[in-house]
Image: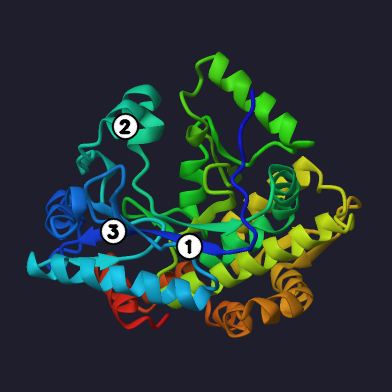
Amino acid sequence: MDIRFTRNAETTVGIELELHVVDPETGDLASASNEILGTIGARHPGGQHPKAKHELFQSTIEIITGICANPAEGKADLEETLREVQAEAANRGLKLMSAGTHPFARCADQLVSPNPRYHTLVEQMQWPARRLLICGAHYHVGLESGEQAIAVVNELQRHLPLFVIASASSPYLETEDTGLASARSKVFESLPTAGLPPILTDWHDFESFMQTLLTARCISSIREVWWDVRPHPDFGTVELRMCDAPSTLRETVALAALAQALVADAAGRFNRGELPPPPREWTIRENRWLAARYGVEAKLIVDDEGRREPARAVLERLIDDLRPTAERLGSSAELEDVLELWSIGPSYLRQRRMIEAGCSLQDVVAGLIEQLETDEPR
């Protein structure tokens, strides 16, 4: 099977952010995406907004950017669409919030979006699909070739836990404190083609893998392989899908800077023959669990001898290595913001602090709404 990879001469970045639609009076989710998207889509050809989309449930809306040179451009693009969706939601007495999970909404109460693709997904996957009341952030970074993409996907798995931690915003699920920093990551990996990708040797190996799944009719399109990090041949990108939806655009854009710099650095090292061998799969899997469970308190495995280091130290070393690349890309300020935001604490910590201070889960929702509106993580 030949899969064409669209060549990108530059390591451009694109951002996709999934958002919850909320009734501010009750704090619960509102199934209003059909009406909101229908109204704002009517202003565009074909009745569809080019940068605001349906997701699985009618209580969720995805906003996307175009192809951006850097994270600052991505933020301006996201802001424009976000304000438009927020304004139409407000016309209906509704608000938007960004987090990996809603703290208390019930999966069973949600309505599936009208797209037949989503109804097919639920029919095929059953319970795992019906549990997907989750929101994430995805990052696309442009690459030159499929061979480069496979090498970069393998290398990115070494750093995947840092993205899980920095974006973690899903400690609560259906009123329960899960004990995790990112419950969303564990919910999503229950799908058969989600979670960690295999370590692949080259582009031909990727093509063979996809051919096997298609021939076996396990999937009908390679787009149905939802790995935490995957090649996207049509876009000519590597797509990072491991992140919870951060609670502010500031956090979302900081992680875009980390993603772009990391992919650009790895691609350059691949071209020079300097990439190290991929990490062992058991190490990747264990570190992903440690990140989802312990968040900023995680101690990650850093070598084959089982030596562990605090995640903060691992992040600091990585950002130090990426500073020259970020400077070249024009994203130094956003990359440095990753460390500042880590010090403030990811959203999962901020949500738990509210509960520890005596707030309710409804108060947590109100706080998440305010953070998205003000772009202030607190």
**Dot 1 crowding, Cα within 10 Å, few <14, some 14–19, many 20+:** some
Q: What SS does tag 3 mark?
A: strand
Tell me the residue at 30%/73% (across/down): 80
| Label drawn at residue 117 | 2
Pick whichever, 84 or 218, lies toward us: 84
Q: Which residue occupies 79% across, 36% down?
A: 201
Q: Indicate which disc residue 375 carries.
A: none
The first of marks 1 and 2 along the sequence is 1
Q: Is residue 103 visible?
A: no
Quadrant of residue 333 in the image? bottom right
Q: Position of residue 202 (x, y in %)?
A: 77, 37
Q: Which of the two discs, 1 and 3, labels the residue nearer the N terminus? A: 3
The amino acid pointed to by label 3 is His
Q: How far across and down, in percent of the image, does residue 95 sit?
A: 20, 68
Say which quarter of the image contains residue 227.
top right
Residue in the foreground of this view, choosing between 148 and 128: 148
Foreground pick, 266 / 9: 9
213 sits left or right of 303 in the view: left
Q: Alpha-carbon distance for marks 2 and 3?
A: 20 Å
The label shown at residue 67 is: 1
**Which is in the foreground here, disc 2 or disc 3?**
2
**Residue 369 higher or lower than 301, as above or below:** below
Residue 20: mark in rendering: 3
